Image (cartoon, rainbow, N blue to C red):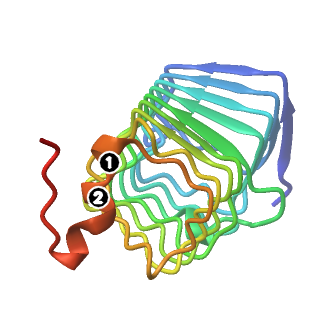
Amino acid sequence: MEQAYIQDKSFEKIDFKGKPFHKGEYENCTFHYCDFSSVNLSECKFMGCEFIGCNLSLAKLVKTSFQDIKFKDCKMLGLHFDTCSEFGLSFSFENCTLDHSSFYKIKIKKTLFINSQCVEVDFTASDLSDSVFENCDLREATFSDTLLEKVDFRTAVNYSIDPASNKIKKAKFSLSGLPGLLEMHAIEISLD
């Protein structure tokens, strides 16, 4: 079956659970309030696209290509970004819910996570160098053998990061975030 090439198109309020999603390459397209939940997006290629107010929860992302993608106001529960194509992989997240998603072992340097919820997200062995977690909830997110050099956590909350099992050189933290760096050592901190 021949794959489609779609460029500069806007998709509005389409439920792709009920209507088939055409596999192919999407360049500079915008998806507004579309429902991709549980849809198979495997082997699709998205370049310079925006997803605004979409539900992508549990979508299948095997060999999916995301290059220079903006996700805004999206529900993205349980996504396996670790199965995506690593070639050119780059995206940003603003006001998104990424709970239970996985970024296991992928390189996503300079990624912006802004005002997003990342509860129980797996960042194990990923490269997040120079990324920013601005006003993000990282409750129970997993950081183990993760490259966190120059990552900005100053406004992030609820993280637990063991400096002994992650590379955190020149990462930025706020004073209020120090307990998240020390809690695994059972150290009690008093700020008075």
SS category of the residue bearing label 2: helix
CB within 8 Å, label 2 to label 1: yes
> Does residue 59 appear in the picture of this structure?
yes
| Residue at image mark 1 | 177
Amino acid type at mark 2: Gly
Q: Which mark is residue 180?
A: 2
Please tell me whether residue 58 is drawn above or below residue 172 in the rendered image: below
Q: Please tell me whether residue 180 is drawn above or below residue 185 in the rendered image.
A: above
In x, y percent, where is residue 85? 73, 66
Can you say which quadrant of the picture contains the C terminus? top left
Q: Secondary structure at mark 1?
A: helix
Q: How many marks?
A: 2
Residue drawn at (56%, 62%) of the image: 81
Q: Residues within 10 Å of mark 1 (few under 14, many from 20)?
A: some
Q: Residue at x 12, y 64 (%)?
A: 188
Residue 187 or residue 181, whichever sits in front: 187
What residue is drawn where x is 47% and y is 46%? 153
Q: Nearer the viewer, residue 64 or 184?
A: 184
Q: CA distance from mark 2 to mark 1?
A: 6 Å
Q: In the rendered view, does 17 fall on the left or right side of 89?
A: left
Q: Is residue 95 left or right of residue 93?
A: left
At horizontal 26% and vertical 50% (from top left) the residue drawn is 158
